[in-house]
Image (cartoon, grey):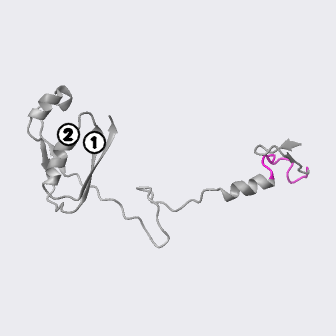
């Protein structure tokens, strides 16, 4: 006799030649039915960006990535104090010749410490009349 792992009810399973070497049943039928109703339904997802693909969609519409910013620093930013960073001119240059009007921009940064880098990059984009500016930083 084995008890159900969930509700602790006794599970009576007849021993036959077909289930002799099979794994024992650990959950009763009532609990198994309840678990099947709670089962997460998996949807088709894009293998590149993991976004769900709807039934009427044949493929994913990937987010376009464009490397459009470069920096011109004299020294590494980590060696400067906050005051020294503020006193320097804006080091960012938009290199891509694209129309940013009414576009959503996502800036990906490695470390967010003082916010000056994000602010300086945003200033370059706001001049171009963007619609939205978001930031994703890996560490703080």
Q: Which mark is residue 25?
A: none
Mark 1, residue position: 109
Per the rendered image, the range of residues in magenta is: 15-28
Q: In this image, 81 relative to 31: left or right?
A: left
Instruction: Please state, as top left, top right, bottom left or bottom right, where the C terminus lies in the image.
Output: top left
Residue 6, position as x, y percentages in the image: 75, 45
Q: Which is more N-terminal, label 2 or label 1?
A: 1
For mark 1, does the 10 Å Cα neighbourhood hold few (<14), some (14 to 19), or many (20 or more) residues?
Answer: few
Q: CA distance from mark 1 to mark 2?
A: 9 Å
Q: In this image, 41 relative to 86: left or right?
A: right
Judged from the image, the secondary structure of the residue bearing numbered disc 2 is helix
Picture quarter containing residue 86?
Answer: top left
Q: In this image, 121 relative to 38: left or right?
A: left
Question: Magenta-highlighted stretch: main secondary structure?
Answer: loop
139 shown above or below 129: above
Judged from the image, the secondary structure of the residue bearing numbered disc 1 is strand
99 shown above or below 87: below
Instruction: Residue at 16% x, 60% y: name it.
Output: 98
Mark 2, residue position: 117
For mark 2, does the 10 Å Cα neighbourhood hold few (<14), some (14 to 19), or many (20 or more) residues?
Answer: some
Instruction: Please state, as top left, top right, bottom left or bottom right, where the N terminus lies in the image.
Output: top right
Picture quarter containing residue 38?
Answer: bottom right
Q: In this image, 49 relative to 17: left or right?
A: left
Residue 117, position as x, y percentages in the image: 20, 39
- Mark 1 or 2: the one toward you: 2
Instruction: Residue at 68% x, 59% y: name it.
Output: 37
Q: Pick whichever, 54 or 34, lies toward us.
A: 34
Instruction: Residue at 44% x, 56% y: name it.
Output: 50
Residue 25, position as x, y percentages in the image: 80, 48
Residue 93, position as x, y percentages in the image: 12, 48
Was residue 64 drawn as part of the magenta stretch in this picture?
no
The extreme bottom residue here reads 56
């Amino acid at each position: 006799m084995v008890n159900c792992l969930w509700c602790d009810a006794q599970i009576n399973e007849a021993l036959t030649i077909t289930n002799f070497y099979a794994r024992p049943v650990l959950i009763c039928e009532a609990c198994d039915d309840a678990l099947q109703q709670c089962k997460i339904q998996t949807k088709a997802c894009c293998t590149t960006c993991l976004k769900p693909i709807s039934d009427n969609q044949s493929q994913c519409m990937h987010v376009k990535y464009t490397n459009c910013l470069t920096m011109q620093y004299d020294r590494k930013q980590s060696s400067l104090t906050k005051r020294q960073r503020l006193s320097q001119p804006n080091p960012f240059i938009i290199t891509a010749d694209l129309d940013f009007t009414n576009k959503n921009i996502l800036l990906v940064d490695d470390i967010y410490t003082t916010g000056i880098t994000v602010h300086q990059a945003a200033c370059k984009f706001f001049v171009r009349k963007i619609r939205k500016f978001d930031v994703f930083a890996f560490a703080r």
